[in-house]
Amino acid sequence: MPRNGRPYNPVVTLNGWTLPWRMKDGWKEFHLIAEPVVREMAPGMKANLWGYNGQSPGPTIECVEGDKVRIFVTNKLPEHTTIHWHGILLPSGMDGVGGLSQPQIPVGKTFVYEFEMKKSGTFMYHPHADEMVQMAMGMMGFLVVHPKDPNLHRVDRDFVFLINAYAIDPGSRTPRVSEMMNFDLWSWNSRVFPGIDTLAVRRGDRVRIRMGNLTMTNHPIHLHGYDFEVTGTDGGWVKPTARWPEVTVDIPVGAMRAIEFDANEPGDWAFHCHKSHHTMNAMGHSVPTMIGVDHRDVARKIITLIPDYMVMGERGMADMGEMEMPIPENTLPMMTGQGPFGPIEMGGMFTVVKVREGLARNSYADPGWYKHPPGTVAYELKA
Amino acid sequence: MPRNGRPYNPVVTLNGWTLPWRMKDGWKEFHLIAEPVVREMAPGMKANLWGYNGQSPGPTIECVEGDKVRIFVTNKLPEHTTIHWHGILLPSGMDGVGGLSQPQIPVGKTFVYEFEMKKSGTFMYHPHADEMVQMAMGMMGFLVVHPKDPNLHRVDRDFVFLINAYAIDPGSRTPRVSEMMNFDLWSWNSRVFPGIDTLAVRRGDRVRIRMGNLTMTNHPIHLHGYDFEVTGTDGGWVKPTARWPEVTVDIPVGAMRAIEFDANEPGDWAFHCHKSHHTMNAMGHSVPTMIGVDHRDVARKIITLIPDYMVMGERGMADMGEMEMPIPENTLPMMTGQGPFGPIEMGGMFTVVKVREGLARNSYADPGWYKHPPGTVAYELKA
Amino acid sequence: MPRNGRPYNPVVTLNGWTLPWRMKDGWKEFHLIAEPVVREMAPGMKANLWGYNGQSPGPTIECVEGDKVRIFVTNKLPEHTTIHWHGILLPSGMDGVGGLSQPQIPVGKTFVYEFEMKKSGTFMYHPHADEMVQMAMGMMGFLVVHPKDPNLHRVDRDFVFLINAYAIDPGSRTPRVSEMMNFDLWSWNSRVFPGIDTLAVRRGDRVRIRMGNLTMTNHPIHLHGYDFEVTGTDGGWVKPTARWPEVTVDIPVGAMRAIEFDANEPGDWAFHCHKSHHTMNAMGHSVPTMIGVDHRDVARKIITLIPDYMVMGERGMADMGEMEMPIPENTLPMMTGQGPFGPIEMGGMFTVVKVREGLARNSYADPGWYKHPPGTVAYELKA
């Protein structure tokens, strides 16, 4: 619960945190500093990004319907910027479109946005100045406006994250900012598996997960073990008559979705983008297929020249999830992760919703991860 | 209001017009001529396209539920063609699929389509003969069937456009017709920013915008300052219980969406595709990143060889929206446009919904554009 | 109707079949064998894929709400695998995520999945082990759970298929398994036009078509001649208040949609993906445009060197649907097919819904295809 201002039920930002504020003469004041940052995308790999207040994405802004907010934006980037408050109903001059609704904020200067939060919902903020480049560098943040009545749309767990993607070539650190489709790192809050927080909930909890997409393509986010409904978008709350039952929510670019379900079935439930390349880390996409090719004879000759040469891919790629191959510095393996039963063989946009009898607040790296989930039945393998 | 036939409330086609007709023995007769055309996509850039009646897209066809229409289609292209009436309920032989429902229309010949408009809604027409090529060249048009009762689904402003994309290499004029993904010009009605009409409405108007997508990917169309509902598709009108509140409508390929909102908040509201590469004009996508690279030393040496050489991209790309660089003939700059507060830094699928106390029918090029929009609050920049 | 177990109204799998089962002590037992298969994608082209029980996709599993199922999965692939039961509510240990919910099934071993079908609906199965590779090779299958009451959600025709895509270079047989976007063969149940079954129905039938997408991009599936509603997803049945009228259903990756309509209008109705490259077979996407280029003079010189040289593409590509050009072995022409009125000029994700007064159960290859559909009106071509 917040220390001052209207009461609300806070959200949990995956691998992130909520921006503090101060109350001043009835206004809630926030301060965002746009600046270059270093983001660890998963253990072993760091990226040079642009973000806010030391992080990409920037901190989550939480406020309450009816709040009057004043947001100071200081520009410590090497070029001008603005902030657009995506989905918020506000005066045209506060809308943050550089050149159209305001002059861009010059390097070293501070611009003050002031508006009232007219309705509750799920929103985001990002630049609208050199927009393609600045979003490709990681500039974005979540914005939640809670209902004035804390019992409206109430849930037990409320998670938020933004979907983004980076074109960082293996061995390098800074995104290529002109890339349209061939991204290497498909990320949630600028983190990739196994670096993404798990979503730990207590059995029986009503759970909401809010997501926004700032990449170049739709992301169909799939939850195992449950069906759910979309209860909100960046346009508002979806009325019950209009809701569809789903197990995969397709999140368009520049859109947000809140999904809800009752966590009644215990276990470790995979939660990921269903485009199978988006659950991989760095990889090449145009390599020839080796499946079914018997190249042992050629390999024998190659090995006389390159002793480390490995015969791979003839039988699929599961080998690559099991073994450690040398890769360039500051690069994540294509498939990685260890679960309670062996290699997970994933990367990118993958994590786990952990439904437990008692609340398990551990992260993926936590050994608690390895505990056999309740409800699991062990089966004998038969010949 | 139409001069003859059933009364209706006409639509406004962005950068386009409605096809005239004549009444003959109770039939509404239209004439479409398929032919090569030259389309100015924005000032300074012309494309060799294929279209109808001198334009790509072809003129909008407007008629009324219950109308019996007869459409003469004359083929002045260098190859055969047909027209498919997307979304219209009609006899199989009138459906326009070459080889399946009719012989293709040979070069120089005219085919006559006859059918009754059974229901009102938002539709389009395009070839179903050498379909990939002919749509890649710009052959398509909007088709609106108004309700028999002009007060049904009535709005104050009703805008229509088609979303298309062209692979025209910098310095050239004719699209590459085999391209699947790497398009250069992301356009609305074959126009790109700053060549797309603004949508001017009076404060308080009920506004409808109808869009159809004939590209190779979804386009998430985002409106600033408002939330809206999808009230119609190419399948019919969406009942109120099924509608979602949204600020970004994801328009699938081969689908149409009508959105509606009450224009109560005055101002200049950005309206654009939210895929950030789709609000750029011609650019390369696989260039290396220069961000953070200090290449002034190298630059000094290069300048001794190439005196015009410019150090760019080290600090982002905002420079490119501000300055004029030499580019190939018949090519639009990647980022362009000037607003009341400076460079807009946009291209492609971007325009503005202008909500005014009095109706402002000016286009983007009109100096009226620069007037400070009502509701804008000027803020001091602080150090 | 099934020979044993609860009664239900069976589905029709395009170019496929339903997996038999045996009843044992109140359990419905199925056996899936994961193994390499050869799939004829259309006459003249065979692919080396991985599938189940001799086919890709594997056989459709049909069962009934309340059924207790036991599924033996034997791994005859060259690497380990698992099966994930997409959309099914089950215990965490039966969820099939390799490493997370079970150890991967080693080569030569059998794993037994056991769970109860808690609700009716439209689901699928696929590996969750080396997932990207195994799905790129064709491992997937449909899973339908019928309602306990056979009159619930009852229709007259119920078709099912999965949407997939393969990167098989012209002249080769095995998919490139690392491809993310540049697929050559856009397929339904691993078949492409003209190899996809038609959907034959009797006039007046209530028709349901269920589709699931396991590619890397959305597929907007368009039906001519009808509007329809989405009545179900992999999350459950969509309530009537929430349904939209549509003519194109955009199917996200990792999602399923059931559409329904009343087949009241006789005829041959095209049914296809609306991304125009997805109704082509093998082609290059980055070739320069020849439209409007007069290269007859150059051609004369080339022909002195290469006598077979053909001047093509100057006037569009319709030529290519009409004539037979030499192409590499085991490769399908880009555009192909013959209809009652000439060349269809299609490939990939295209087939026809045939609505007849009497039921026509013929496939596309059947000469019945050429019969003039009822409701067709022949028109004179005019000069």
Image: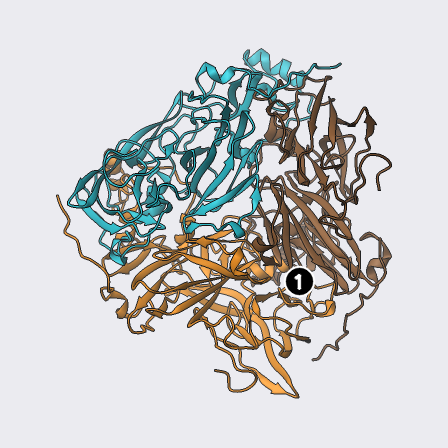
Chain colours: A brown, B cyan, C orange
Q: Is residue B308 visible?
A: yes
Q: Quadrant location of the C terminus of chain B?
A: top right
| Extreme residue in the bottom direction | C25
Q: Would residue C348 be visible to someone looking at this image?
A: no
Q: Is residue C135 left or right of residue C328?
A: right
Q: Is residue A102 above or below residue A136?
A: above
Q: Quadrant of residue B381?
A: top right
Above/below status of B369 relative to A23:
above
Residue at the limit of the structure toward the left, as seen here: C383
Instruction: Give the quadrant of residue B307.
Output: top right
Q: Secondary structure at mark 1?
A: loop
Give the image location of residue A358, x and y in percent. 86, 60
Give the percent coordinates (x, y) of residue A16: 78, 41
In the image shown, does A350 or B354 lie closer to the viewer? Answer: B354
Question: Looking at the rendering, which quadrant does residue B168 occupy?
Answer: top left
Residue C281 location in percent, x, y? 40, 54
Please name the amino acid that badge 1 sits on. Answer: Ala
User: Looking at the figure, which quarter contains the N terminus of chain B?
Assistant: top left
Query: What residue do we see at 29% from left, 74% from top?
Result: C358
Q: Chain of mark 1?
A: C
Question: Is C76 positioned to the left or the right of B332 in the image?
Answer: right
- Give the class, few, some or many, for how many residues have Cα within 10 Å of label 1's Cα (few <14, many ≥20): many
User: x and y percent of residue C175 in the render?
Assistant: 51, 58
Q: Nearer the viewer, residue B106 or C356?
A: C356
Q: Residue at x 26, y 44 (%)?
A: C310
Residue A130 against residue A367 in the figure, above or below: above
In this rendering, is residue B36 above or below C42? Answer: above
Q: Which residue is mark 1?
A: C129
